[in-house]
Image (cartoon, grey):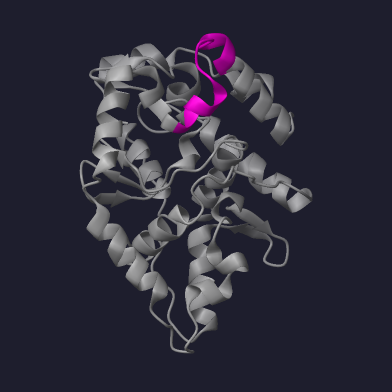
């Protein structure tokens, strides 16, 4: 979300959030289906699968430009660095692929997961760090776009075409999901704004020169390369949005952001992943 004029925020802040009050006790699948129905009603000409393109789905010209850029992505060298890190043996002699089912292929759409043994949400980045520690390496800092970010960017490309398949099973998982939901719909910052204000209520609305993207489909394409080869992770995007509404953000990897990612990702279930794409 770009910097938005204060008066625009004030105008939008008076709008209600579809899900925040009417479905406080709804289950995850009911939440997701209500949102799908909401957007189907609002944008009847859009197919469900189109939501993987986020705001581009609303703008044929921008989508055409995106398609042209993706023929020769400007960030190929950065993904190559991620591939090198992914394939470099750890101190034990094993690689990241040795830590993960199916060599890490076609599994990223299952993340984040709720780990009952740990009693918390575990992101894909957490899993990569767990692999490092188990094989004699130090964990990378969550949010480090030169190491962990590049590895996760490359790894997610190994799951392109996989449909998002987040599971919320058991009391602990549901509690984490509900916490993420509260963060998504909770108003924060000096501008008293929530994620849902932009990405549910006002999806498809143009703010200055940019269209606001719908929440469904957003989690399918991160990390993204913004404006060329600048890698941005999903949780770094959370930080940026919270700065924009003049709220002090959490650090990537916090319990709040992990739970938010868990809720957020669930809403894209059934949509195909297309990781490490270009965005403005």
Q: Residue furthest bottom?
A: 92
Asked if 79 appears above or below 195 in the picture, the reply is below
- Residue 42: image x %, image y %? 52, 10
Among all residues in the image, which is located at the extreme front? Answer: 71
The reply to whether residue 196 is in sight is no
Quadrant in the rendering for residue 205: top left
x, y percentage for residue 108?
54, 54
- Residue at image x 36%, y 66%? 83
Residue at 35% in and 43% down: 277
Q: Is residue 43 left or right of residue 193?
A: right
- Residue 45 located left or right of residue 263: left
Residue 133 rendering spot, x and y as whole percentages: 50, 80
Residue 46 highlighted magenta (yes or no): yes
**Quarter the N terminus occupies:** top left
Residue 42 lies within the magenta run = yes
- Residue located at (36% from left, 25% from top): 56
Q: Indicate the quadrant containing the C terminus: top left, top right, bottom left or bottom right.
A: top left
Name the side, left or right, on which 108 lies relative to 231. Answer: right
Residue in front for this viewpoint, 67 or 28: 67
Number of labels in the image equals 0
Left or right: 72 in relation to 199: left
Question: Can residue 102 be seen here?
Answer: yes
Compare residues 83 and 16 and report the one nearer the observer. 83
Q: Which residues are magenta?
A: 39-52
Horizontal and vertical percent position of residue 214: 47, 25
Would you place residue 276 above or below residue 187 in this image? Answer: below
Image quarter of residue 270 = top right
Q: Is residue 121 above or below residue 90?
A: above
The structure residue drawn at horizontal position 59% and vertical position 43%, both measured from the top left corner, is: 164
């Amino acid at each position: 979300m770009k910097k938005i004029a204060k008066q625009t925020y004030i105008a939008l802040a008076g709008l209600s959030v579809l899900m925040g009050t009417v479905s406080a006790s709804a289950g995850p699948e009911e939440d997701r289906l209500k949102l799908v129905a909401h957007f189907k009603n609002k944008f009847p000409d859009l197919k469900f699968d189109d939501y993987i393109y986020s705001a581009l789905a609303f703008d044929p010209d921008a989508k055409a430009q995106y398609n042209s850029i993706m023929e020769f992505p400007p960030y190929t060298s950065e993904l190559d660095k991620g591939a090198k890190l992914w394939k470099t043996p750890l101190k034990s002699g094993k690689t990241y692929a040795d830590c993960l089912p199916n060599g890490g292929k076609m599994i990223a759409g299952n993340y984040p997961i709720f780990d009952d043994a740990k009693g918390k949400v575990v992101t894909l980045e957490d899993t990569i760090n767990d692999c490092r520690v188990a094989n004699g390496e130090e964990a990378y800092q969550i949010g480090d776009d030169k190491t962990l970010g590049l590895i996760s960017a490359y790894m997610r490309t190994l799951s392109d075409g996989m449909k998002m398949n987040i599971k919320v099973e058991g009391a602990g998982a549901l509690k984490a999901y509900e916490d993420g939901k509260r963060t998504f719909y909770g108003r924060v910052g000096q501008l008293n704004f929530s994620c849902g204000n932009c990405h549910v209520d006002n999806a498809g609305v143009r703010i200055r020169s940019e269209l606001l993207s719908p929440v469904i489909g957003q989690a399918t394409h991160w990390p993204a390369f913004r404006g060329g080869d600048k890698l941005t992770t999903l949780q770094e995007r959370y930080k940026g949005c919270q700065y924009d509404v003049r709220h002090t953000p959490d650090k990537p990897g916090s319990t709040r952001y992990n739970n938010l990612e868990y809720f957020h990702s669930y809403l894209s279930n059934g949509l195909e992943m297309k990781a490490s794409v270009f965005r403005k």
